[in-house]
Amino acid sequence: MIFSERLKELRLEKDLSQKEVADLVHVNRVTYTNWERGKREPSFENLVNLADLLEVSLDSLFGRE
């Protein structure tokens, strides 16, 4: 599974909107949407914030269980 798909899957499991996740990791919604669409990639700092928010390891965030 590619990162963008995994990110969306984890967000939906937490029942969060794109805007909620964006607000919680301190980026705008368009930036977050681009991550889910595979158009952009988050910085390492944002990857860590996403993993913490979604309560998964970085490996899990990348689909590497």
Image: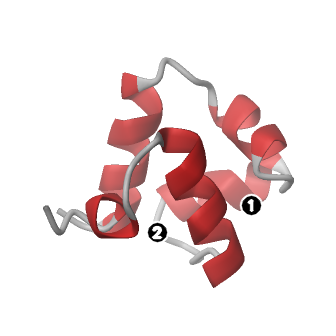
How many numbered marks, from 0 up?
2
- Compared to residue 2, the image places residue 28 above or below, namely above
Which percent across, then down, holds residue 11? 47, 35
| Kind of element beneath mark 1 | helix
State the residue at coordinates (38%, 39%): 10
Residue at the disc numbered 2: 38
Residue at 46%, 42% (x, y): give it: 55
Which quadrant holds the N terminus? Answer: bottom left
x and y percentages locating residue 32 in the rendered image: 67, 54
Along the viewing direction, whichever of 28 and 65 lies nearer the viewer: 65
46 and 2: which one is in front?
46
Residue 40 visible somewhere in the drawing: yes
Amino acid marked by disc 1: Thr
Left or right of 26? Residue 43 is left
SS for tag 2?
loop
Badge 1 crowding class, 10 Å Cα cut-off, few under 14, some 14 to 19, many 20 or more, is some
Q: Residues within 10 Å of mark 2 (few under 14, many from 20)?
A: some
Q: CA distance from mark 1 to mark 2?
A: 11 Å
Say if mark 1 contacts mark 2, CB within 8 Å. Answer: no
Vertical placement of residue 18 versus 22, above or below: above
Image x and y of residue 50, in percent: 58, 55
Where on the picture, by quarter, is residue 39?
bottom right
Position in image of residue 15 (x %, y %): 49, 17
Task: Identify residue for label 1.
Answer: 31
